[in-house]
Image (cartoon, rainbow, N blue to C red):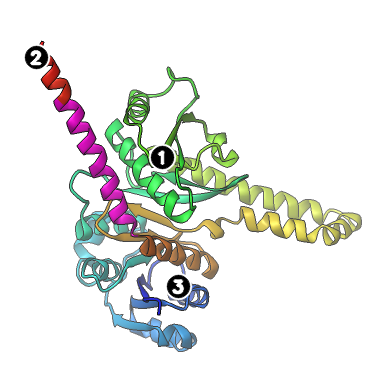
Amino acid sequence: MTATVTASLDVMGGDRGAEVVLPGAAIALSRHPDLRFRLFGDETIVRPLLEQQPQVKAASTFEHCEISVKMDEKPSQALRRGRWRSSMWRAIEAVKQNDAAYAVSAGNTGALMAMAKFCLRSPAGIDRPAIAGTWPTVTGKCVVLDCGASIGADADALFEFAVMGAAMARTLLAKSRPMVGLLNIGVEEVKGLEPIRLAGQMLRDAGLADLEYVGFVEADDIGRGRADVVVTEGFAGNIALKAAEGTAKQIAGHLREAMNASFLTRIGYLLARPAFQSLRAKLDPNASNGGAFLGLNGIVIKSHGGTDAEGFASAVEIGYGMARSGIVDEINGDLAAYRETQARMSEAVAQKTGAM
């Protein structure tokens, strides 16, 4: 019998809260019957809606929380006000206490990251967490990180992002040796900021067995699928992905307008409807919803605040796949192996220098 996987859900997070979270949980449960849920939220709101989802209710435990983190609340304020008592904190704390394999929230990103870092901490040696998202490409999907956990990153942090992103690609995309690229303003080695160039040199020199470093990639290479993992700092990564989301919505809007332009175009749409439905499914941001917080002692998934039930289900399923894979231990093992190799190389150089 397959062991169950428990997800803790911040039911109050997002623009519509429980109205999206509970139906999303129902969709994920229909696809993964071994899922179980720990639900955290305001009982006056959650319980009536939970009665409308009997399958979710049967697979869940519910705990009342008197505080919900507001979408516009400052992270420091949310941490002070919502620590111990908010639905967001309690969902994360369930992971720390091993009562859940992972947590999912569609709430305030800054508050979620602040609480996750405070509650779960980062393993020794990891400089900072990153938000890793998946995005459709012409060849399938790729992992992009950091998507907004922090602004700026030095070479060591970019290297860690590469290792963590490669582990996620092996887990979710079934890439045995993912191709990793650093996002830059050009592919030439002389271009870009110094941290990016130095991180590229570190990845070339490391010769890691579990990833293939393919050099610098530009923003238009993301959709082309030139790399399975695209590494950048949070400011550029967040802009790149939101620009891509906006472009997808723009294309969808232009297509709707063109198809309704005349009687003949509406007839043409009906004839080509299966192709357009396939295109819409590939471009739908909800199909790739869910950013994983990598670099913590536990798994936390951030869902887009404005997502629908299908999108929230996608975020739950990303966490499910990561929990099944043991990705936290894999990331820690990969980084520990690299640092051990670095230490041996440094010791060998020191011994050689001392003998001269």
Q: Residue 349: where, in percent of width, then height?
A: 17, 21
Q: Secondary structure at mark 1?
A: loop
Return the mark for residue 21: 3
Q: Which residue is mark 2?
A: 355
Q: CA distance from mark 1 to mark 3?
A: 35 Å
Mark nearer the N terminus (2 vs 3): 3
242 displayed left or right of 94: right
Mark nearer the N terminus (1 vs 3): 3
Residue 324: which quarter of the image? Answer: bottom left
Q: Amino acid at mark 3?
A: Val
Q: Which residue is mark 1?
A: 211
Residue 13: which quarter of the image? Answer: bottom left
The residue shown at (26%, 58%) is: 116
The residue shown at (52%, 64%) is: 311
Q: Residue 337: where, in percent of width, then height?
A: 25, 42
Residue 295 falls within the magenta-colored stretch: no
**Residue extending furthest toward the top:** 356
